[in-house]
Image (cartoon, rainbow, N blue to C red):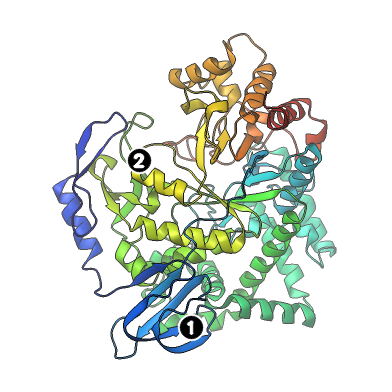
């Protein structure tokens, strides 16, 4: 394999080890989309304590705005962060990234808990959709059982305009969180009669087996607007301070939402003068709907407060970072100059999905991201990390290379494009260390051995799944997340019942617990989770679907929402009822016992 000067590979080895050449036409199209990299040293990574002599004098400004003036060498006490280093005599600036090189990973970490798809985990008080109050309830239930980690599906924000995307992996923004997560009843002022009436209507949606995001938001939004209309002067002051703290990033999101309400959910269909956030017309349009801009900023403050309430319950909250964004959404509007619109992120054909995958998510242009010191990546990580929590990075291999599929083309026509993977990992390590948060990499599938070693050196946990492992959990590595399954794979009931049981995956299950045909699934669940708990892995998690014996996986790759209610099938039990659910209790107790009594 060779990689050209644009970072494009001439082919790849598939999951069976066979060489697949990349299409010359695709390679040429990628060259055109990437363009010529900017000259100069755009990013420079150093470790804490570095005191390198500079080739000529530079001006150094720290990330927090502190001006260190002219320097001839790096001050040895530089704090962690992404700083600006500019030659005194002119020339391109350099982003000086001070990173520890290895993220936060406590020694001898052996935690256990539950992974949950938040929107489908509802309580009797939910407004038709799982929310952050339900996350808080789940955290309390887990803590009572002795568990200490709660892994959450992506909390990323969809565009809050009909139709609202169901997939949490197709977000409008990865920097901001979904306003559908707000428990309206817990917002100060929610005791108004008009809000109470809307809440009663919303709770009637709990009778539906499928979460309907549009119907939920059609009730949440006016309820929140009623509370917003009655806000006090103190409320205004608190919001003003929060908006100042979060600056341009929050303003950009709030402006996008306000304009989307007027012109539609995709900025690509807006009037031409509004399609770039830096245009003067955008400022004028935002000023004309200033109250709506402020409203959408306020929603993010509410989400932030309620997430913090859930965090304080105790268990470590591990959030999820999707690999990309909706091309018509807020992040793609705000960062459009950094993206290759002509391509989609995906995966080549393999034994799991023979036709390959194209996810409709535009990729970063590598040199453009590097040219601004990877600050957008740092922003995404910082927004997704709760202090003392964790983050699962979906498709973590994308930090090294991404498979680019031509828009409208087949995945078989794609090619891999490389990033400066070590530098991206240094940014991940930087934000992990600053937040004191553990990082998990979803590294299932084809991962280059050298990059897997880099992941381990950075302290990023691997992902190990029973369905893919021929060796028992007791032999899995310590720096790993151990699970039976994931949201894209068969559930335990689906596998054991034969409803959704690929032969190779079934063989790995039976190698672990013996034949499952005819056995009570509850017994199989207890045994496999006890074995999972005995793993030396840092995290061992049960999915809430397996704890509740759900036969259908949350998402089936390669299907659409019209074909199947992906990401939307509500759990068969309310989160309020989990303490009295015998199957859930038995599964979680088995997992916890495996942690404390591995033998």
Examine the rendered structure and indicate whether residue 40 appears above or below residue 134. Answer: below
Q: Work out how far the residue at label 2 is from the one at label 1, CA to CA, in angstroms.
A: 48 Å
Q: Which residue is mark 2?
A: 449
Residue found at x 19% / y 59%? 5
Examine the rendered structure and indicate whether residue 64 appears above or below residue 167. Answer: below
Q: Position of residue 21 (x, y in %)?
A: 18, 40
Under tag 1, what secondary structure? helix
Relative to 188, 508 lies left or right: left
- The dot on residue 283 is 1
Relative to 476, 96 lies left or right: left
Q: Nearer the viewer, residue 550 or 51?
A: 51
- Mark 1 nearby-residue class (10 Å; few <14, some 14–19, many ≥20): few
Under tag 2, what secondary structure? helix
Q: Nearer the viewer, residue 428 or 519?
A: 428
Examine the rendered structure and indicate whether residue 332 appears above or below residue 402. Answer: below
Examine the rendered structure and indicate whether residue 546 appears above or below residue 245. Answer: above
């Amino acid at each position: 394999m060779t990689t050209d000067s644009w970072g494009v590979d001439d082919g790849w080895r598939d999951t069976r080890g066979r060489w697949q050449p990349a299409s010359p036409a695709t390679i040429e199209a990628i060259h055109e989309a990437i363009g010529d990299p900017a000259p100069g040293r755009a990013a420079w990574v150093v470790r804490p304590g570095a005191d390198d002599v500079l080739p000529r004098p530079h001006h150094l400004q720290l990330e927090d705005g502190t001006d260190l003036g002219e320097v001839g060498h790096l001050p040895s006490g530089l704090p962690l962060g992404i700083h600006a280093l500019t030659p005194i005599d002119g020339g391109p600036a350099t982003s000086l990234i001070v990173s520890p090189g290895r993220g936060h990973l406590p020694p001898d970490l052996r935690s256990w808990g539950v992974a949950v798809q938040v929107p489908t985990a509802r309580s009797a008080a939910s407004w038709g959709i799982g929310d952050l109050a339900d996350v808080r309830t789940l955290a309390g239930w887990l803590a009572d059982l002795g568990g200490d980690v709660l892994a959450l599906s992506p909390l990323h924000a969809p565009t809050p305009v009909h139709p609202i995307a169901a997939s949490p992996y197709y977000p409008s923004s990865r920097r901001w969180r979904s306003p559908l997560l707000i428990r309206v009843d817990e917002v100060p002022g929610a005791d108004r009669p008009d809000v109470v009436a809307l809440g009663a209507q919303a709770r009637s949606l709990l009778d539906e087996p499928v979460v309907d995001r549009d119907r939920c938001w059609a009730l949440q939004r006016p309820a929140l607007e009623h509370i917003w209309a009655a806000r006090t002067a103190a409320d205004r002051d608190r919001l003003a301070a929060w908006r100042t703290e979060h600056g341009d990033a929050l303003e950009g999101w709030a402006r996008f939402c306000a304009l989307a309400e007027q012109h539609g959910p995709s900025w690509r269909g807006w009037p031409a003068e509004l399609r770039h956030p830096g245009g003067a017309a955008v400022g004028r349009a935002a000023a004309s709907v200033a109250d709506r801009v402020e409203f959408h900023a306020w929603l993010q403050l509410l989400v932030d407060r309620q997430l913090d309430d859930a965090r304080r319950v105790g268990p470590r909250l591990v959030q999820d970072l999707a690999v990309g964004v909706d091309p018509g959404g807020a992040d793609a509007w705000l960062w459009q100059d950094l993206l290759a619109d002509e391509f989609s992120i995906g995966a080549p054909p393999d034994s799991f999905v023979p036709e390959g995958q194209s996810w409709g998510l535009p990729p970063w242009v590598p040199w453009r991201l590097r040219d601004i010191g990877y600050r957008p990546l740092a922003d995404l990580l910082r927004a997704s990390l709760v202090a003392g929590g964790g983050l699962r990075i979906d498709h973590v291999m994308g930090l090294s290379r991404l498979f680019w599929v031509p828009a409208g083309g087949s995945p078989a026509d794609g090619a891999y494009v490389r990033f400066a993977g070590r530098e991206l990992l240094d940014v991940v390590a930087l934000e992990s260390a600053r937040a004191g948060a553990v990082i998990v990499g979803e590294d299932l599938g084809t991962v280059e051995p050298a990059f897997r070693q880099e992941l381990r050196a950075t302290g990023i946990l691997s992902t190990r799944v029973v369905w893919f492992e021929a060796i028992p959990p007791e032999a899995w590595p310590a720096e790993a997340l151990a699970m039976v399954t994931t949201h894209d794979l068969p559930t335990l009931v689906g596998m054991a019942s034969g409803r959704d049981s690929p032969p190779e995956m079934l063989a790995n299950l039976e190698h672990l617990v013996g034949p499952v045909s005819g056995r009570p699934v509850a017994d199989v669940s207890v045994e496999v989770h006890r074995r999972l708990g005995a793993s030396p892995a840092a995290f061992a998690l049960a999915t809430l679907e397996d704890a509740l014996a759900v036969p259908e996986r949350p998402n089936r790759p390669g299907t659409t929402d019209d074909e199947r209610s992906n990401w939307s099938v509500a759990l068969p039990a309310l989160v309020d009822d989990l303490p009295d659910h015998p199957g859930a209790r038995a599964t979680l107790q088995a997992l916890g016992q495996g942690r404390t009594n591995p033998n």
